[in-house]
Amino acid sequence: MIALGIESTAHTFGVGIVDEKAKVLANEKSALKTETGGIHPQKAADHHLEKGLEVLRNALEKASLDLKDIDVIAFAQGPGLGPCLRIGAVGARTIALIHNKPLVGVNHCIAHIEIGRKKTNAKDPVALYVSGGNTQVISYRNNRYRIFGETLDIGIGNLLDSFGRRLGIGFPAGPVLDRWYFEGHKFAKLPYSVKGMDLVFSGLETAAAKKIGTIGKKDLAYSLLHTAFSMLAEVTERALAQTGKKEVLIVGGVAASKALQQIVSKMCEERGAKMFVPNVQFCVDNGAMIAWQGLLEFMHGKRTPVLNSAVKQRFRTDEVEVNWL
Ligand code: ATP
Ligand code: FE2
């Protein structure tokens, strides 16, 4: 059985093709590049409209398949930016209707976790989903992926990119700050803001911005990342404690950060837990994760009639009844 998945929640338009063993036959994408890091929803949607067909063709060519060979059409139904989501949804509906294929709308956050689980062999992890727009600590309990903690303001990747902009680093700034983390030495105290199980980053950014010019850029990068990632590690650790689980799975674009991996793996070591990080192509937004999630749900009976396929900008992780575990 073969599924084709369309990802278009933010600045990436991706098309992935996978089989029922999660073998990835294609995982093509095009991402809108911006100077500033901010995404203008309509500009991203225009990018998807412009590149979508080409990405689809590339994926089919890579997999040496024709649309008629596909069994399931999956798409990211949310959460994300409305105009962007709609391009992917219209594409998926069109293919499904013309080729008479079943349609499955999936939750983008859950897709990150499931492809991560499949590719790393993590069994029942606490997932730390860290990207530009999202920061959530998620774990499975009683038929749902529950959100144990999350950002109350900006995503961790946005923090890195927007702070990087203040330092004059181009977008994305995450990888540069991550390198600087290991080159900085002096630690400047910055506001550490964990509220219950939730996180707040904007005060941290403001305070760090005030320090620009008073200490070296690399020291500041070290201080900012150390503070923000320690906050993530604390909430993840408390989710481990609450659930009694022994695995941490990091997904999302910021999972590529060596600094984050170091801080989380140290916490895991101290608790006797194991850390898993998938290959970067499955961490960032991609079509293969949508295809795999769609196929999983399809094999467990899910169908999304076209009339129920409207996009959900605020599609919550815990709205989905999990029947495939
Ligand atoms: P989502 O729609 O799920 O919020 P996204 O559109 O932000 O995702 P991703 O590719 O998942 O896209 O994540 C991009 C983020 O990852 C950017 O903020 C970028 O700075 C950050 N990033 C990428 N590589 C690294 C790295 N090595 N260290 C730290 N941050 C990184
Ligand atoms: Fe994502």
Image (cartoon, rainbow, N blue to C red):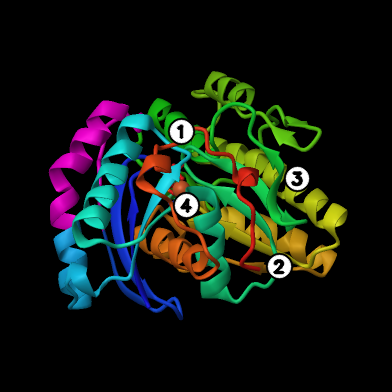
Q: Secondary structure at mark 2?
A: loop
Quadrant where the image shows the C terminus: bottom right
Residue 309, how many percent across, how many down? 40, 43
Label 3 CB sits under 8 Å from any ligand 1 atom: no
Q: Secondary structure at mark 4?
A: strand
- Mark 2 or mark 3, which is nearer the start of the sequence? 2
- Mark 3 or mark 1, which is nearer the start of the sequence? 3
Name the residue nearer the viewer: 13 or 193.
Answer: 13
Residue 313: give its label: 1
Q: Secondary structure at mark 1?
A: loop
- Mark 2 or mark 4, which is nearer the start of the sequence? 4
Highlighted range, magenta = 29-55
Give the residue type that dot 4 points to: Val
Could you give the CA–CA distance between mark 1 and mark 2, rounded to whole angstroms? 27 Å
Residue 288 in view in this figure: yes
Identity of the residue drawn at 24% across and 53% down: 97
Q: Which residue is mark 3?
A: 235
Give the residue type that dot 3 points to: Val
Is 69 displayed left or right of 178 in the figure?
left
Query: Which label sits in the foreground, 1 or 2?
Result: 1
